[in-house]
Image (cartoon, rainbow, N blue to C red):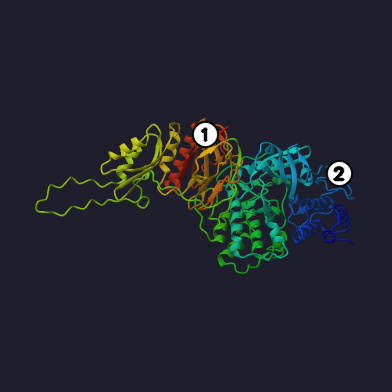
Amino acid sequence: MTSLAQAIRTFQNSGASRDEFLMLVDSALSADDTSPGRLLEILREEQARTPLPADLYAVVHRRIEQASLASHGANTDETRLQTSPGVLQQRSTPSSQFPPPARDFVMSDTDQVKEVGDTLNGRFVLEECLGVGGMGTVYKALDLRKLEASDRRPYIAIKVLNLQFRGNPKSLIALQREAKKAQALGHRNIVTVYDFDRDGPVVYLTMEYLSGKPLSRILRAPEFKGMPYAEALPIFTGMANALAYAHERGFVHCDFKPANVFLTDTGEVKVIDFGIARVFQRPEEETDATIFDPGSLGALTPAYASPEMLEHREPDPRDDIYALGCTTYELLTGRHPFDRVPATQARSSGLKPQRPEGLGTRQWRALRTSLAFEREARMPTVTRFLREFGGTEKHTGMPGAALKAAVSAGVLAVVAAGGYFYASSHRAVSPGQAAVSPEQAAAPPGQVATSSEKPATPPETVAAAPAAPAVPALSLATVAPVLASVPCSALVASVRNQALGVSGYLGRSYGTQKLRTTLSQIPGVANPAVQVQEVDDNKCDMLKLIAPYLTANRPATIQTRDRNTQLTEGQPLVVQITTPPYDSWVNIDYYQLDGSVVHLLPNARSRDNQAPPNYAATIGSAGDWIVSKPFGTEMIVLLVTPAALFDTARPDSESRGDYLPAVAKRLAEIANKFGRDKIAVDLVQIDTHPRKK
């Protein structure tokens, strides 16, 4: 009798055709009484040893699923439907001789299954199978509309709902809820979800395309025996940051596991599949009951589900903490803390996890507490787990649960007028020129070098002439009121050895020469060094916004590549940014000639605008931002804050009259809470021109 493993190895070694291989698989499945959970494990093990083509892997996975006549085993990472506490639901096929239980969802022979090469809604061409999960199959897809628009990033990822979930009449509602919830979770460690739709009976979800591999593939590799704490910490940090962010917004993932953690080729950690996440009621607020609760699908993965989930209790963030603890333990040891036994069985059997080798006392205490079988004894929050296991203190009061990440690689996605633009690689950039705001002129010492020394008195002589009146020492306190009186400006001053320097931005109607004259009237000022950039007077409201936060040594910078600000139609726009030495939220706005503001980051397509300390990135180097109409002088403004600028998403484009007052009010609130010095600003002015004919 040919087993599934033998069929796969025969195909790999003999070079049999696809049809011959599938005949072997069908023969093996019909004669093998192994549980479907174990068959899926065998498939994954063989895949880790010698990978099948992704599309062929998906076909075999689907045949195992459709051929299943028995209940699901617990020993698998697949998401399962659960109909009653402790009872995993059966699925049936038309060939089954036993009638399905009353609450089963029966699949029809005519159920449509999408394959590589198929097209959804005449728009999305499925080009490659990226993975198969409990709720759906994920494909790399070509978006024909983006291709027609000459978008340089025409690929997206599509999750097509599996037959098991599609057979549930609430599946479309579940997918819509997933899209809505995921769109509300804009975090650099959570996959970006765009929308959901259906093509006849096929329902699917569109999301950002990621290049990399799921964490489960690493953990299931035969040679994997665990990784050192220092190597596992960045992965743990990314997972924990994502869950903490979701919990702070009232969501429990409910199916967290290694298969739902994606490691990108650029070193990012992305949590995926919030498909069955449920809203939990926090003590400080009241929530209205929702019409549809995706938890009614009873979906879970037994090996990572907490006892409370298996017992159908209300969701709680500590359910995710249990799953995070199991996943972290596997990262460190290469094995599940309870040998993949469901938590309720592990509890009744008195199983206890063994301390991983080389793990410190504090870290082990945090990990062991996360694996407690009782909620009350479990680590209370992911943030605390992150602090105690990671051994790194977190900024308090920040809404994003962002720690200093061990991996600072990342991808920023942005959108501007004329099309969607994506960040590609990242590299270090040089900091901008020094500046300080007039409102901070009298700030604590250290921000700007000042001198209060008086000129030395000349030595006395017998025939000395009457001494000239002493010139008062020049100070920032003297200069600040003068700068504040200059209309349409964002100016900063520095005083070194009684020499005044002023830099920043100034309205064109006032002009640099008039500024020099004004500064020269200050007692003690002679030949001030003025390095300002003149801007059109229609940008005065924007200068007023940034003036209070412009500082001498700018902790955050933005500039165009090679500092080229003269751009021609069809030329790519590439900008380089740096962020302060603390966790921050990055906001990039494009101030257009028509008086509107386009939010490059965050926006509807990319709400992930968190950055780790000292983050540097080159954005648009792949030619994703292309200069187009209208042409003239416009500005790109970088605004970096220690907390999210807005709790809810703003429209991709809005009038300056609506946006600036809202931003000014929010910046004042952040400054009062965190300090004005935690807000960083910078801008770059560009001139765009039509292509010469």
Q: Nearer the viewer, mark 1 or mark 2?
A: 1
Q: Is residue 55 left or right of residue 391?
A: right
Observer-nearest of 390 and 218: 218
The residue furthest bottom is 357
**Circle number at residue 592:** 1
Query: 300 and 265: which one is in front?
Result: 265
Residue 443 disc label: none
Three-letter code for the amino acid on which mark 1 is drawn: Gln
For marks 1 and 2 on the same chain, the one whose residue lies earlier in the sequence: 2
In the rendered image, the residue lying farthest to the top is 594
Q: Residue at x 42, y 43 (%)?
A: 549
Q: Is residue 373 visible?
A: no
Type of the residue with mark 2: Asp
Q: Residues within 10 Å of mark 1 (few under 14, many from 20)?
A: many
**Under tag 2, what secondary structure?**
loop
Q: Is residue 321 left or right of residue 91?
A: left
* Disc 1 from disc 2: Cα separation: 56 Å
Is 169 situated above or below 390?
above
Relative height, residue 49 to residue 81 (above, below): below
| Residue 402 horizontal/vertical position (percent) | 54, 52
Camera-side residue of 643 and 325: 643
Report the residue marked by disc 2.
109
Q: On the rendered image, what quadrant is the C terminus found in? A: top right
Q: Position of residue 316 (x, y in %)?
A: 63, 51
Q: In the displayed structure, does residue 651 sit left or right of residue 373?
A: left
Where is residue 106 shown, x and y percent of the image?
A: 83, 45
